Amino acid sequence: MNYQPLEIKDCAVIPIATAIRAQSLSELRDKIAIIHEDSIYHHFWGRFFDTQFKNTEFHNDFAWWSHHAIRDDFLAERLSMVDPSEYDNLDQLRAEIVRLINDRLEELEFSPSASRDNQFHFIRSKMIVFDTPQAISNPMELVQVVQQMSATSLFYHVIDAKNRNANQQDDFCSWLSQYGEEYAPLITKLKSADPYFLDPQNIKEFYTNLFTTYFVEERVI
């Protein structure tokens, strides 16, 4: 049987200002309810493209703003625990964020506000995808190739793929599926992996270890 290689891509994002801002928590809720889904995507995943990102406590921009702008650590913690991988689409994710903010507003019975200098600025992102010289023709090459991939390339093939592919699988799973049941245990491991709470700098280490464990420690190459 002729198996198709996995062509490795990389990507970059161009942030686009929307001119939409929120100063109070109720304004934030109202704007989240109507903002383009590309903005929801950016404020959850944009940190993977921020080379200066060092915050490991708050995993999305809404949680960060709740902590730094309105000093509501209780809400910030709730928002930071939201894992977008658990939702089928961005509208479901949007609805969960709106629900959490609504719940907090009901608890507070007022809408806390940030200073004018700390308003929440909604950003959209445009993704640019480009080819690389790399391609995987044999699953056993995964360990070596992943070690050479950039964090943004892994983002494209793992995280973005789950939103891009109709089967909601990452590109590794989709590609390995052509081999039938041979790599079913590896596909199971990949499906159970959740890289969202990883630091962008650690995503390569995570997948290198995953493939190394499977091919080197659990199988004989």
Image (spheres, helix red, strand yellow):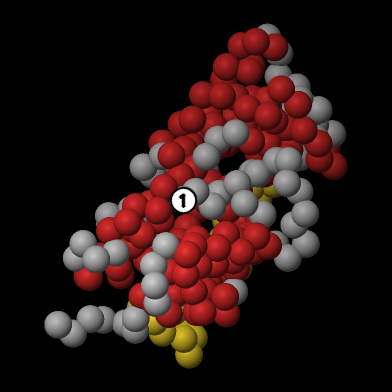
Amino acid at the residue labelled 1: Ala
Front residue of this view, candidates 160 and 24: 160
Classify 10 Å Cα crowding around label 1: few (below 14), some (14-19), many (20 and above).
Answer: few
Q: Classify 13 as above or below 82.
A: below
Residue at figure coordinates x 50%, y 79% from the top left = 145
From the image, which quarter does the C terminus lie in?
A: bottom left
Residue 30 visible here: no
Where's residue 101, x and y in %?
60, 24
When asked about the image quadrant of residue 114, the answer is top right
- In the picture, measured across the screen, residue 156 lies left or right of residue 53, that is left
Name the one closer to the observer, 156 or 137: 137
Which of the two residues, 21 or 184, is positioned nearer the viewer here? Answer: 184
Quadrant, the N terminus: bottom left
Q: Which residue is drawn at 41% across and 39% down?
A: 87
Q: Which x, y percent locates residue 160? A: 45, 60
Q: Residue under circle 1?
A: 193
Q: Residue furthest left?
A: 1
| Location of residue 73 with respect to 13 vertically, above or below | above
Residue 137 % position (x, y): 34, 84
Q: Where is residue 19 in the image (x, y as percent from the top left)?
A: 65, 51
The residue sitting at 49% across, 43% down in the picture is 84
**Which is more toward the observer, 67 or 20?**
67
The residue shown at (84%, 34%) is: 115
The mark total stands at 1
Give the SS element for disc 1: loop
Q: Specify whether 56 is left or right of 207.
A: right
The residue positioned farthest toward the bottom in the image shown: 133
Q: In which quarter of the image is residue 120?
A: top right
Kindly give the residue lying farthest to the front in the view shown: 220
- Any part of residue 133 in sight: yes
